[in-house]
Amino acid sequence: MEVLTTSEMERADRLTIASGRPGFALMLSAGQAVAEAAYDLRARRFVTVDATSEGNAQLRVGAHVTLSDLMPEFDNTYYVVSACHLFDLRQGYRTDFRAECAFIGG
């Protein structure tokens, strides 16, 4: 839920009066918030990585991982969006994960 400042409420009142439609400004504000959230989600997916690491229980959705010693464009901090912890007798404990970043370069 968004909290409006006093100046935003005054602007909302002016827009409501000008448009003749109650709640018009709040619809604009909510629409802007939805648009910004959609933009952020798409931007974060600009660079994605699918990787496997040694097993690490701290590597989970929501964690940030820093990848380095790659091409300079991809050395960066990434947001983990999926993780799968695996164990077998041949490869031992490992973690497969997918991570995303909004931009190229650190």
Image (cartoon, rainbow, N blue to C red):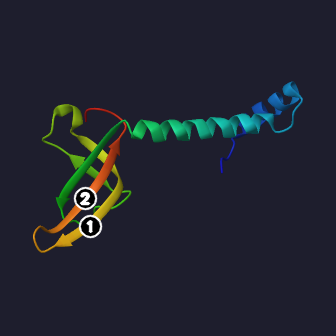
The residue labelled by disc 1 is: 85
Q: Residue furthest bottom?
A: 89
Q: Who's the residue at 69% across and 37% down the image?
A: 29
Q: Residue furthest left?
A: 90
Q: Who's the residue at 46% across and 38% down the image?
A: 42
Callout 2, which amino acid? Asp
Q: Who's the residue at 20% across and 72% down the image?
A: 87
The residue labelled by disc 2 is: 96
Callout 1, which amino acid? His
* Number of the label disc, if any, that sits on residue 99: none
User: Label 1 neighbourhood size at 10 Å, few (<14), some (14-19), many (20+)?
Assistant: some
User: Label 2 neighbourhood size at 10 Å, few (<14), some (14-19), many (20+)?
Assistant: some
Secondary structure of the residue carrying tag 1 is strand
x, y percent for residue 14: 82, 29
Marks 2 and 1, the one that precedes in the sequence: 1
- The front one of 90 and 31 is 90
Position of residue 64 in the picture relative to residue 95 (left or right):
right
Kindly indicate the quadrant of the structure image that contains residue 102.
Answer: top left
Secondary structure of the residue carrying tag 2 is strand
